[in-house]
Amino acid sequence: MRTGIYVYTQATLNIEASEPVVLTSLDNRTISFAGGTMSTAISPGIYKAFTSAPITVTGGGANVAVVIVPNSKDTWPDPPLAVVTTFNVTASTLNSFFTDPDAKSAAF
């Protein structure tokens, strides 16, 4: 499972997970926690997490957008226009960033 978090301005997020989670930003900053519930201040940026179970991300209001793609083999969805203009990224850049290196491709 892949979770993307677009943080437009400094925000406090509440993250709940049943397993350890590492959030990695597009510029390689990381935030790690052992699971359970965590509240953390997070800087603007684009973040990803790869997990086997869903995580819940709340907080930040309109300054935060969360995208969840359950199937790690699917292409990452096109970003909202605000992501492109705020962070100066392309859909191709985000698709590469959100690609799960451990995803198995289907063999036919």
Image: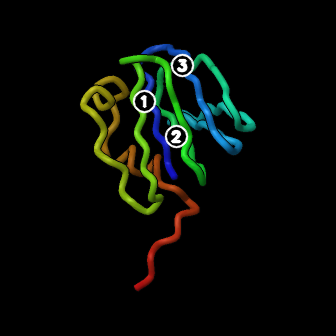
Q: Badge 3 local density, few (<14 within 10 Å), some, or many (20+)?
A: some
Q: Residue at x 55, y 59 (%)?
A: 101
For residue 68, which quarter of the picture? top left
- In space, the residues marked 1 and 3 are separated at their CA atoms by 10 Å
Q: In the image as oriented, which residue stretches furthest toward the left?
A: 81
Whether tag 2 and tag 3 are in contact, CB under 8 A, the answer is no
Identity, as a three-letter code, of the amino acid under mark 3: Ser
For residue 70, which quarter of the picture? bottom left
Q: Which residue is mark 1?
A: 6
Q: Secondary structure at mark 3?
A: loop
In the rendered image, the vertical position of residue 91 relative to residue 85, given as above or below: below
Q: Nearer the viewer, residue 76 or 52?
A: 52
**Percent coordinates x, y for residue 5 in the rendering:** 46, 33
- In space, the residues marked 2 and 3 are separated at their CA atoms by 14 Å
Q: Which residue is mark 3?
A: 43
Identity, as a three-letter code, of the amino acid under mark 2: Lys
Q: Nearer the viewer, residue 4 or 29?
A: 4
Q: Badge 1 local density, few (<14 within 10 Å), some, or many (20+)?
A: many
**Percent coordinates x, y for residue 77 in the rendering:** 32, 47
Q: Residue at x 75, y 37 (%)?
A: 34
The first of marks 1 and 3 along the sequence is 1
The first of marks 1 and 2 along the sequence is 1
Q: Is residue 93 left or right of residue 31?
A: left
**Percent coordinates x, y for residue 104 in the rendering:** 52, 70
Q: Secondary structure at mark 2?
A: strand
In the rendered image, the vertical position of residue 43 relative to residue 55, given as above or below: above
Q: Which residue is mark 2?
A: 48
Locate the C terminus and report the quarter of the image it occupies: bottom left
Q: In the image as oriented, which residue stretches furthest toward the bottom?
A: 108
In the rendered image, the vertical position of residue 21 relative to residue 13, given as above or below: below
**Percent coordinates x, y for residue 20 in the rendering:** 71, 42
Q: Secondary structure at mark 1?
A: strand
